[in-house]
Amino acid sequence: MLGKEHKGSELDSNRAQQNGSKSPELEINHNLEKSDSPTDASPLYVDSNDIPIARRPTSACELCKSLIGAAAGNFLEWFDFAIFGLLADEIGHNFFPKGADGVQLLEAFAVYAGAFLMRPLGGALFGWIGDKYGRLNALRISIFMMA
């Protein structure tokens, strides 16, 4: 009836009682009673599954590097979309067969729209892969698929 997490925590509690110390669960609950917000100095907080997760403190430099990396990636992605939109007429003339006036431009914009429609689907797919197999594996798979 109990999940694996609860069975493991019962074993840890039994071992802790045999050694004469408090159980880890009681210490975690005691810390949570003092403060309910995860932003306090407490190194542990409880997620939705009631499994304690240790937070790694990050320095301002690490946060700044992450922010700059995310901003650069976002800028490059939107720059790519802007350049494609500005050059859609030339892309249509060079990559699509000649037809009625404006058909090549509409075909180029159809490719442009397809890219926008695939973004949320790719985000959902690679988000699931990242949750199940890890973010690094999701990144590796996405780069492999682009190459």
Image: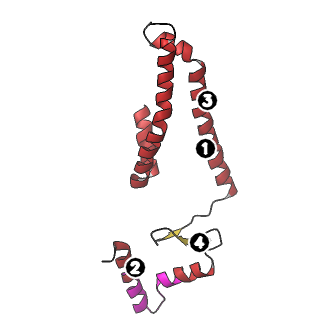
Residue that carries the numbered disc 1 in the rendered image: 70
Q: Where is residue 25 in the image (x, y as percent from the top left)?
A: 47, 81
Count residues near mark 1 (Cα–Cα under 10 Å), then give few for <14, some for 14-19, many for 20+: few
Q: Is residue 5 left or right of residue 50?
A: left
Mark closer to the observer (4, 3): 3
Q: Distance between the residues labelled 1 and 3?
A: 14 Å
Asked whether disc 1 touches disc 2, contact meaning CB atoms under 8 Å apart, the reply is no
Q: Relative to the observer, which residue lies in front, 7 or 112?
A: 112
Q: Name the residue under label 3.
A: 79
Which residue is tagged 4?
A: 43
Q: What residue type is labelled 2?
A: Ser
Residue at the image position 48 percent from the left and 30 percent from the top: 115
Q: Which of marks 1 and 4 is nearer the N terminus?
A: 4
Residue 133: x percent and y percent? 39, 52
Name the element at disc 1.
helix
Dot 1 or dot 3: first in sequence order is 1
